[in-house]
Image (tube, rainbow, N blue to C red):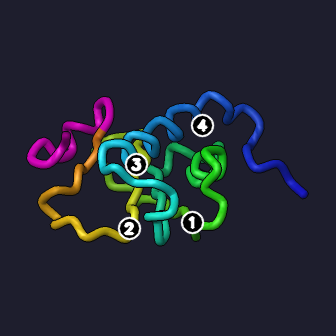
Amino acid sequence: MPPLAAPGADHVQPVRRSMLTAVLERNGLTPDDLISLWFTATPDLHSDFPAVAARGLGITDVPLICAQELDVEGAMPRVVRILAHIESDRPRAEIAHVYLGAAAALRKDIAQ
């Protein structure tokens, strides 16, 4: 069986784990609340699958998928996005949209 992470990708996974942890913590979610997770990455990130971070956090029974963002000229490089499908009774207005680091500039209107 091939390794989950590509050689040299070890430095990226802690950042991805912290991003997923921030999404879960800021929204008061546990793995049991997750229906599925969709990860995307800009084309310049290709050393590993972003979903490996979820497996590293023990999220093992939730469907995960990874995709590549469109290669749009002038787009912010080195961005990973997470779309979480969750089970919740909270209204959409109470959901925290998490943007870390420079990515906060992408959606200043909803970044928390």
Which mark identifies residue 64? 1
Q: Nearer the viewer, residue 77 or 84?
A: 84
Give the x, y percent position of residue 27: 30, 50
Label 1 packing within 10 angstroms: few (<14), some (14-19), many (20+): some
Q: Amino acid at mark 2?
A: Ile
Q: Nearer the viewer, residue 29 or 71?
A: 29
State how far apart marks 1 and 2 are (Cα): 13 Å
* Dot label at residue 18: none
Q: Sequence order check: which comes first, mark 1 or mark 2? A: 1
Residues in magenta?
A: 100-112
Name the secondary structure under disc 1.
Answer: strand
For the residue pair 76 and 82, the one nearer the viewer reads as 82
**What is the C-alpha distance between the residues marked 3 and 1?**
15 Å
Dot 3, crowdedness within 10 Å: few (<14), some or many (≥20)? some
Sequence-first disc among 2 and 4 = 4
Q: Earlier in the sequence, mark 1 or mark 4?
A: 4
Indicate the amino acid at tag 3.
Answer: Leu
The residue type indicated by label 1 comes to: Leu
Going by the numbered disc 4, the residue's amino acid type is: Gln
Q: Nearer the viewer, mark 3 or mark 4?
A: 3
Q: Residue drawn 21% across and 65% down?
A: 90
Q: Secondary structure at mark 4?
A: helix
Q: Position of residue 39 (x, y in %)?
A: 48, 58
**Residue, disc 4:** 13
Mark 2 and mark 3: Cα distance apart in space: 10 Å
Q: Which residue is mark 2?
A: 86
Local crowd at mark 4 within 10 Å, few (<14), some, or many (≥20)?
some
